[in-house]
Image: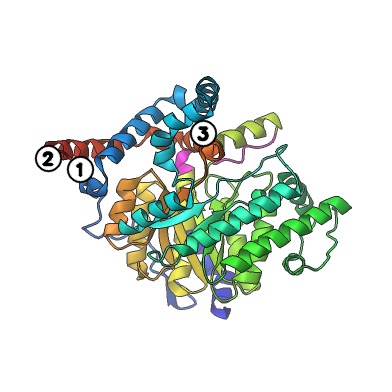
Amino acid sequence: MESVRSLLIHPSFHHLLSVRLLGTAAPRTVNGKRLAVCPFPGGSALPAALSFEDSSAFHVKSLQELVRALGVFKFCSFPILVNNSGKLMSLARSLLGKRGFSLILRPTVYAQFVAGETEGEIAVAMEKMSSLGLRPMLAVPIEEDLGESTGERRYNDNLEAMLECVRLSSSNALTTDPMMQLKITALLSPELCVKLTSLLSEEQYDLDLLVRAMDGELINFPGLTESENTHFLCGLQRLNKVGEASVMKVRVLVDAEYTYMNPALALITMAMMKKFNQKEAWIWNTYQCYLKESTSCLLDAINQSVNQSFCLGVKLVRGAYMDKERKLANQESRPDPIQQSWEHTNDSYNGSLDILLDLISQHPQRFRLIVATHNEESVRHAVSRMAELGIDKQAGSVCFGQLLGMCDHVSLTLAQQGYLIYKSMPYGSVDDTLPYLVRRAQENRTVLQGIRKERDLLRQELRRRLRLTGGR
């Protein structure tokens, strides 16, 4: 860890960070160690075999899956339908009833983006992922926003669902190094997270204090009322149970949420890392590069992991709450937290990617990364930098991630070329996953409207399949 610490405090490293973000020339050594730095966004040529233009990646899909994907993506290409998907689905449910609505949604949108409801359905979906060379990353689509808190009983029920997710994730013998997703607001009220975020702007809570509370010590946190303190202790102990159940079995990727609660979520996640990540990264945090503050948050996490001597796992995403964040900022007359443009977000993402890959190339056991993106340029950039830095694509320190039902031409191609690729797989009933499905469509409509290539590749494969006698 001392070598990592010296790297972080070295002036050349901070110059390297500006290089990653601004794309200027950089020294190729820090403390005498070669970093193999290349100006963003270039790099050495990709391995010749890696291409996302070949429809043969879809040979593994059934005829029914091809038709379903084309139909769903066609629906998602109409902004008016996507923007009003929540209202349309609510109307359809009221007109058709719960059973009729489920009969329509289950074989279409639900089947495209959700792994299933029963343990048997989930197991089949996981086994199919594994057979394609993909790794399942299960996710219980449970979270709360302000005004939706339902009390300790509901949070305890959610805890049981999370522990079940740990069990399901580790039950698939075909999957090595399983991962799952976790939203802290499934186990702790968003109102408390917002208050903690406000308190953290004035006073920092010591990570050791949270770790002691996770272990059952009755800590009185400054700034909280008695009832808030009690709920916070209960929430920390619920999270501790997830950590204890998952360590040495399943890597838990904590999702980022809204800016008005993210500092509290980051604090709690860092405390979990300090407790459970002493030897390996079992608890990971998510960094949203569409936020202007994302780079500083990432650098702070790196520094904390070094100073507090724990391993850091990073899920790097562009982001998923852009419209709501901008709307809230406008309503509250505060600066827009979102990057100025898509290009600024790309620069932030690829710059953060380079920072982490440089660290991983020197300390693969202390830092781990999942490149969670549907952006082909960023995937190519990551693959190129891995090759330059000599990062073993099978070692596990760097992997890739996409959502179930989306970007399969990238996922399958990466898997065929031997890269570790995870597919985020939510599961649950139609009713339980409906908010997730609506949010998935709305938050990813830019991606969904831009999947022309995937649709073209699906059509090519469908035409090829139909030329065969009987299809598949």
Picture coordinates of residue 113, whole percent (x, y)? 43, 42
Q: Quadrant of residue 46?
A: bottom left
Q: Earlier in the sequence, mark 2 or mark 3?
A: 3
Mark 1 lies on residue:
472
Mark 1 is surrounded, within 10 Å at the Cα level, by few (under 14), some (14 to 19) or many (20 or more) other residues, namely: few
Residue 13 image offset from top left, x and y in percent: 52, 67
Q: Amino acid at mark 3?
A: Val
Residue range of the region highlighted in magenta in the rendering: 334-344
Residue 346 placement, left or right of 156: left
The residue lying at 65 percent from left, 70 percent from top is 274
The residue beneath circle 3 is: 438
Q: Nearer the viewer, mark 2 or mark 3?
A: 2
Q: Work out which quarter of the rendered image holds the N terminus and state it.
A: bottom right
**Mark 2 neighbour class, 10 Å CA radius: few under 14, some 14 to 19, many 20 or more:** few
Q: Nearer the viewer, residue 17 or 210?
A: 210
Q: Residue at x 40, y 46 (%)?
A: 374
